[in-house]
Amino acid sequence: MMELLSPAGRWESMAAAVQNGADAVYLGCGQFNARRGAQNFTPEQMPDAVAYCHLRGVKLYLTINTLLSDRELPQAEALLRQACQWGVDGVIVQDWGLASLAHAVAPGLPLHGSTQMTVHSLAGVEEAARLGMRCVVLGRELSREDIRLICKHSPIAIEVFAHGALCMCWSGQCAMSALIGQRSGNRGLCAQPCRLPYRFDGGKAGYPLSLKDASLAGHLAELADMGVSILKLEGRMKRPEYVAVITRIYSALLRENRRPTDGEMRELALAFSREGFTDSYWQGKPGPGMFGVRSENAPDPTALFQASKAAYDREGLRTVPVVFSAEIQPDVPARLTATDPEGRTATVTGPVPEPARSRPLAPSEIQARLSKTGGTAFRAVKTEVHLGEGLSLPASALNALRRDSLTALSALRTAPPERETFPPPPLPGNGCAALCPPALTATLFAPEQLTDELAALAPEIIYLPLERVRGFPLAKYAGQKIEFCALMPRISTDHEAPALRALLEEARDRGCHSVAVQNLGQLAQARKTGLLLRGGFGLNIFNSRSLAQCKDWGLASAALSFELRHEQIRDLKKALPCEGIVYGRLPLMLTENCLISNEGKGCARRKNIPVPCTAPHKLTDRRGEDFPVLPVFGCRSEIENSKVLYLADRPEYRQCGLRYANLRFTIESPAECVRVFQRYLGQDGPPPDAYTRGLFFRGVE
């Protein structure tokens, strides 16, 4: 049966999940988790939390699923060491630098790849397995066909989100909260800008980014048949009563191997919904019907929550069956053995029984005494009694035997496994830090942006979206010293792999010299081209150990996260040449739901045709800011920032050790591309009418 994994934003939520049938819980301790806004757990609470769960046969996974800076890695390392001591059953991680550190420091600690890793293909799962992951949490956008294919061939466990909130953006690829509010979703502080109203192309205000909560309650049997190992419920920010309701219902559905009743679906909706639920991603049919908001007139769940709380507050919903075996014979100390379902046994001894003066001890009396396990995590399901004739033993002695045996059995059940820890490996030196100002590179979106004037300015690398390479006249510039690099899409699922492979071969044949990978699953495919490998910003490189991992992958360079401050970039130990975006509209969201198609703008969703439409559109927020919406590979949408990042007049980007400085052109005209490039070459010119310094100086929390 699939493992049911429930959220625990605080102690009461953990108890609610355990008491209502969770097989495992996931929780955060301190700052390094994707729900920093939850109450979370303190290091002082963790030993008791692990013991509470393990005593009742429930696993506990610790989340350290955020991007970490170099200054934070030592604290995260200490947390990993503590996790070994506490005996957690695994750690859920996002950051590849942390993952490599965990393997070195605590090799016996199981690692799970967070959905924030943006793993969404079989190749990505296989690469994660090679890098030591025991389990991968798949992207919530995948269809049943995608999940089935991955499960069929996966060498490690697969975890799937079954219920709860859906982000509009692919997990790990959202920068909207960071750039607009300085609260990074990659750092656990998303401000949920997707729940705000917007207008599309100047139309009526609505909520085009607010998805309904997902519910796969009706598909659990199919998920089990596919081979999904872990079924995950979302909700660390929600109240304990919510956790109790959804855990109770999903636990019952799994135990009883059935679909939910109408009444159970009403309870799920009453606990929380945004105008109902959706399973459209599962069906492979994303579209406008998936959207909803939390209504102010939503039904009041107070009565449901009060009943749920009253039930789990008693702490008696979840008990461990135990078998007692009592040996009470003349002239030897009384013995009691307690055995749990996993076969652990605890044996204790008591006083020597005395000859009975009047009424001898009866087996039924012993059974009655031993069955009184109230106030513990156990229940007696069977009591074997081996009793000699004519003996007497005080009730207090029997009670003490019961208490002592259960205490000993509890200690066995909660004992942390022995795990060795080791010193962290040294980081590579800073030999790849550029000592001179970085070379300029350009990312182009449209073929018309590649002009003779731009080429004459000699960008060292020109990145071209892989799906659009065929439109660029590369042969015309074959004799110039410009490296053309095919930029792979940040999302590419298994059913898109044949199209992607054909596009890679075409890009190589048309004159591309290199290819930039954007997610873990693209490494194997890119290596087969024989082209030089580079790393795109979709890899979320945030610290020196992640850079070292990129070098191990065979990348010749890596683009850094644009959420880093320039001081953080400067201080990185650069194991390979680094690139930073220094101009352009930074991407805020990458959505599986095609906003253009949803708004009826004539874009057909044709998943097997890789070249998307070209017309840009826009979202407008409450303050009148316009955010361009660009169509990208796979009929997805990419929302760009309303203002361009502009650093041409600031020397800091030239002084932080970058080998390459990237100018990212999206909706600029060919003439604008040339003017901006000239400005970064030091020629005089005005700044853009509306620009931002992005996160280059202020960073993120």
Image: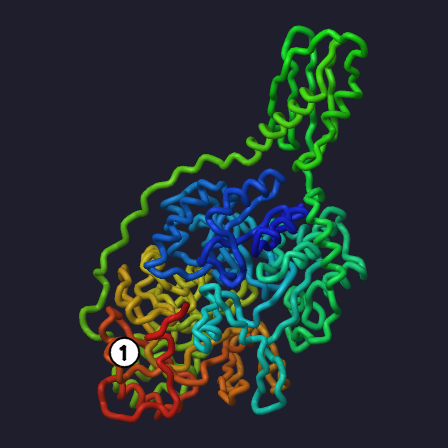
* Foreground of the two, 52 or 646: 52
Q: How crowded is mark 1: few (under 14 residues within 10 Å), some or many (20 or more)?
A: many
The answer to whether residue 183 is seen in the rendering is yes
- Quadrant that contains the C terminus: bottom left
Q: In this view, does 146 lie above or below 679?
A: above
Residue 391, position as x, y percentages in the image: 74, 10
Residue 178, position as x, y percentages in the image: 44, 73
The amino acid on which the numbered mark 1 sits, given as a three-letter code, is: Leu
Residue in the picture at 28% in, 83% down: 648
* Foreground of the two, 682 or 554: 682
Left or right: residue 115 compared with residue 2 = left
- The image quadrant that residue 239 belongs to is bottom right
Residue 94, position as x, y percentages in the image: 46, 58
- The image quadrant that residue 672 belongs to is bottom left
Residue in the picture at 58% in, 59% down: 236
- The image quadrant that residue 667 belongs to is bottom left
Residue 656, position as x, y percentages in the image: 25, 70
* Foreground of the two, 700 or 371: 371
For disc 1, the marked residue is 440
Q: Which residue lies furthest to the left in this view?
A: 435
Residue in the picture at 30% in, 81% down: 647
The answer to whether residue 452 is seen in the rendering is no
Left or right: residue 305 compared with residue 152 = right
Left or right: residue 144 compared with residue 114 = right
Secondary element type, mark 1: strand
- Quadrant that contains the N terminus: top right
